[in-house]
Image: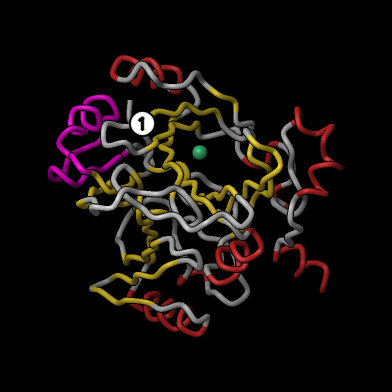
Amino acid sequence: MKLEGIHHITAITGDAPGNVDFYAGTLGLRLVKKSVNQDDPTVYHLFYSDEKGSAGADITFFEYHDARRGRAGAGMVHRIVWRIGSEEALEFWAARLSSAGVDTERGHGRLRFDDPEGLSLELRVVESNDEVLTANHPDIPNELALLGFDGVHAYSADPQASEPFLGDTMGFESKSRLEWYARGESRGSFYVYDEAPAAPGVSGAGTVHHVAWASSIEAHDHWRTRVAAANPHVTPVIDRYYFKSIYFTEPSGVLFEIATLGPGFAVDEPLESLGESLALPPNYEPLRAELEKKLTPIKNPRSVTANRT
Ligand code: ZN
């Protein structure tokens, strides 16, 4: 039983329209679902991914309107890394981000920058046999596009405390005491610890809320049993409508989720028009008119393009 790398990563934004501009505009991902936080339906939950809304490329944001900037600290993911395919792609992104007014830092085969709210992001040239997960964007040639997640960096004050859990329970392979790899049959992602800053973390805009790891639908209950043996505080299985989930913290304090590969985002709207209208889980459907009044209006760039042509 192996996890298939990262399923999705969820972060916090205080500015949904700016978030759409950056992730669907500048980075060229597809806004595949415009929904609400199932625990607080007055705020958006935005999902960006590849063309098909695949796990492995899905970054999601809870909007807390005008939320204060947070700061990553011990027990939090502090950087998200995407794969790109070549040095040529790296050149392309350095130029594209710079012309969008984003400061970048070049390293060997990598490009580091922050999103508009200070969330640390990186593009890395990676050779991999995993399926490439690209979105179509009119200004980004497919061969230069983001290809899905490579992994995440987290801050830990005591990485050693997480070793048995990551190795035995999660089934991650250890590359070193600080570097782990979740490799399944079809996909893999790294999970790396960096030394935590002295200042404690503060949750807020520009910080990661949790990272979800991918499980087959069949194995999900078994994963819950396995996690519960090590951490009795794991949640029951929660139906997130697009997938089923369990949540728990790993010993370093990072909030983990294990989510199922399916049924996926096309369960309530056609693949062609994913993310264009507000998608509500059935239990919130009666509140649609009220919720649409409370939520900041945002336009999916896809539907804007469609309207123009
Ligand atoms: Zn999640």
Answer whether residue 178 is magenta in the image: yes
Whether residue 272 can be seen here: no
Q: Magenta part of the protein: which range?
A: 157-183
Position of residue 33 measured from the top left corner of the image (x, y, whole percent): 66, 48
List x then y, in percent, for residue 259: 48, 32
In this view of the protein, can residue 125 be seen by the observer? yes
Q: Residue at x 74, y 38 (%)?
A: 280
Residue 161, located in which quarter of the rendered image?
Answer: top left
Q: Relative to residue 107, is residue 298 depicted above or below? A: above
Please provide percent x and percent y for residue 252.
26, 36
The structure residue drawn at horizontal position 79% and vertical position 43%, both measured from the top left corner, is 291
Q: Which residue is mark 1?
A: 249
As displayed, is residue 29 above or below residue 196? below
Local SS, label 1: strand
Q: Amino acid at mark 1?
A: Thr
User: Residue shown at 31%/32% (left/top)?
Assistant: 250
Residue 81: percent from left, percent from top: 36, 58
Quadrant position of residue 157: top left
